[in-house]
Amino acid sequence: MNNLKTIGKSIYFCTNNSTKTRAELLKKGVDMGYHITENGIISTAHATAAYLKAHNFSKKVYVIGSEGITKELDAVGIAHTTVGPDQMHGSLGEFMSKHLVLEKDIGAVVVGFDEHFSFPKMTKAASYLSDPNCLFIATNTDERFPMPTLVVPGSGSFVRAIQTCAEREPIVIGKPNPAICAPLINQKIIDPSRTLMVGDRANTDVLLGYNCGFQTLLVGTGIHQLSDVAEWKQSKNPEDKKLIPDVYLPRLGDLLPFIVDKATGGSY
């Protein structure tokens, strides 16, 4: 990535991770050695706050998520609930009669990754969303994060639970919604026909590229592999065809021999 910047390419990091602010993501990237700036980071927590601010939101947000979301809301002056555990106390009857308290002036429910997701949170979210004027916003709908010996639920698991209970469709801020890249396109900062979307998850990264008119590169260091691409090619479902990348590489570093240094005319 640094070498691509050296030869004049613009790089933007687009993440569905709502647990960190752009400033925190910047620090992480710099610590890892990336030559990046905060303006080069597109995050769902920041984009969610920007969306509400752009719509002149003036009420309070019920947040199911982490401090990444609440800090970005603070940055634009939007009131919100606190995050963290909201545990079930006693039986359902006891919880409903003694512990369930709904806050006033909630105008939006925002759902992101929440390691403290619980029955009380789902109950409150669905109750707020019974008001048709209350916004339902999802930072992203990533289903899960497979690991060698277990599966970690992603934000999409929580969104789907609330969606079922509330009988409402959310506004999805993150990938693959092309709205997250709309400012770059509308302000002509990037040209879709000359933009390559690189990612390791087809139903977010590659699909975002498809939706924005970008070229797409799937790397095999994450969720989806070349074997998945082969299945989508055989599928008769037109939605699966949108997941097929233009190019596949086992890892992004495999590009290095093909990056030409304009200054020397040689390759890295």
Image (cartoon, rainbow, N blue to C red):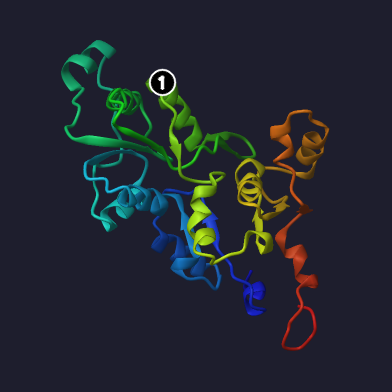
Quarter where residue 103 is shown:
top left
User: Looking at the image, how many numbered discs can be counted on the residues?
Assistant: 1
Q: Say which residue appears at 49% left-offset and 64% top-offset.
A: 187
Of residue 45 and residue 30, the one placed in the foreground of this image is 45
Of residue 207 and residue 220, the one placed in the foreground of this image is 207
Which corner quadrant holds the N terminus? bottom right
Q: Please, what secondary structure does the residue beneath circle 1 have?
A: loop
Q: In the figure, 88 relative to 245: above or below?
A: above
Amino acid type, label 1: Glu
- Residue occupying the far top of the picture: 93
Report whether 82 appears left or right of 17.
Answer: left
Of residue 264 and residue 118, the one placed in the foreground of this image is 264
Report whether 112 appears left or right of 194.
Answer: left
Which corner quadrant holds the C terminus? bottom right
Camera sees residue 115: no
Q: Say which residue appears at 64% left-offset and 77% top-offset.
A: 8
Camera sees residue 208: yes
Of residue 185 and residue 156, the one placed in the foreground of this image is 185
From the top left corner, tell me how far across and down residue 27 is, in percent: 44, 66
Q: Within 10 Å of the Cα at label 1, are there few (<14), some (14-19), or many (20+) other Cα atoms?
A: few
From the top left corner, tell me how far across and down residue 232 is, in percent: 77, 35
Q: Say which residue appears at 67% left-offset and 43% top-offset.
A: 202
From the top left corner, tell me how far across and down residue 159 is, in percent: 45, 31
From the top left corner, tell me how far across and down residue 89 is, in percent: 25, 21
Quarter where residue 252 is shown:
bottom right
Report whether 83 appears left or right of 103.
Answer: right
Q: Which residue is mark 1?
A: 167
Q: In the figure, 16 relative to 125: above or below?
A: below
Quarter where residue 235 is shown:
top right
